[in-house]
Image: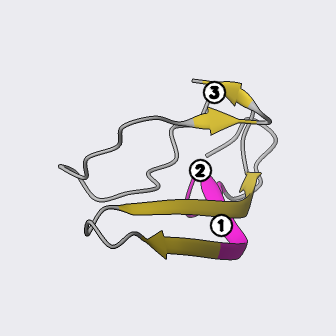
């Protein structure tokens, strides 16, 4: 429980609006783009799982910068 006596958030983050765009090429490969809003419910760094474990990702960027 937080020091001020309030209840802690049930999760460290909340996902709200999400938009997913997928393009599938004739070769069978796909390009996906996701835009989402994440609300962090506590101070500091919070890990937010976006894809299931084992999902292959060839590149990623955030705000136009490679990550």
Counting residues from the start of the chain, the first of labels 3 and 1 encountered is: 1
Report x, y in % for residue 39. Answer: 76, 56
Say which quarter of the image contains residue 65: top right
Q: Is residue 30 left or right of residue 13?
A: left
Does the image show residue 44? no
Give the farthest residue toward the front: 26
The residue shown at (61%, 73%) is 21
Q: Which residue position holds label 2? A: 12
Q: Residues within 10 Å of mark 3 (few under 14, many from 20)?
A: few
In depth, the one of 11 and 38 nearer the eye is 38
Left or right: 39, with 32 as reference point: right
- Vertical relation: 55 (above or below) 30: above
| Label whose residue precedes the other's in the sequence (3 or 2) | 2
Q: Quadrant of residue 6?
A: bottom right
Which label was assigned to residue 45? 3
In magenta segment, residue 15: yes
Which range is magenta?
Answer: 8-19
State yes or no: discs 3 and 2 in contact (Cβ < 8 Å).
no
Q: Nearer the viewer, mark 3 or mark 1?
A: 1
The disc at residue 15 is 1
Q: Compute the Cα span from label 1 to label 2.
A: 10 Å
Q: Is residue 31 above or below residue 5?
A: below
Element type where label 3 sits in the image: loop
Q: Nearer the viewer, residue 58 or 35?
A: 58
- Residue 56 is marked as none
CA gap, disc 3 and disc 2: 10 Å
| Label 1 residue SS | strand
- Neighbours of disc 1 within 10 Å: few (<14), some (14-19), many (20+): few
Q: Picture coordinates of residue 1 (x, y %)?
A: 61, 46
Viewer-proximal residue, 46 or 37? 37
Residue 28 on the magenta span: no
Q: In the shown orientation, is residue 37 left or right of residue 55?
A: right
């Amino acid at each position: 429980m937080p020091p001020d006596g309030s209840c802690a958030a049930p999760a460290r983050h909340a996902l709200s609006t999400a938009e997913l765009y997928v393009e599938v090429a004739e070769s069978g490969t796909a390009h996906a783009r996701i835009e989402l809003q994440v609300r962090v419910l506590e101070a500091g760094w919070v890990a937010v799982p976006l894809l299931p474990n084992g999902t292959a990702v060839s590149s990623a960027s955030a705000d136009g910068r490679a990550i």
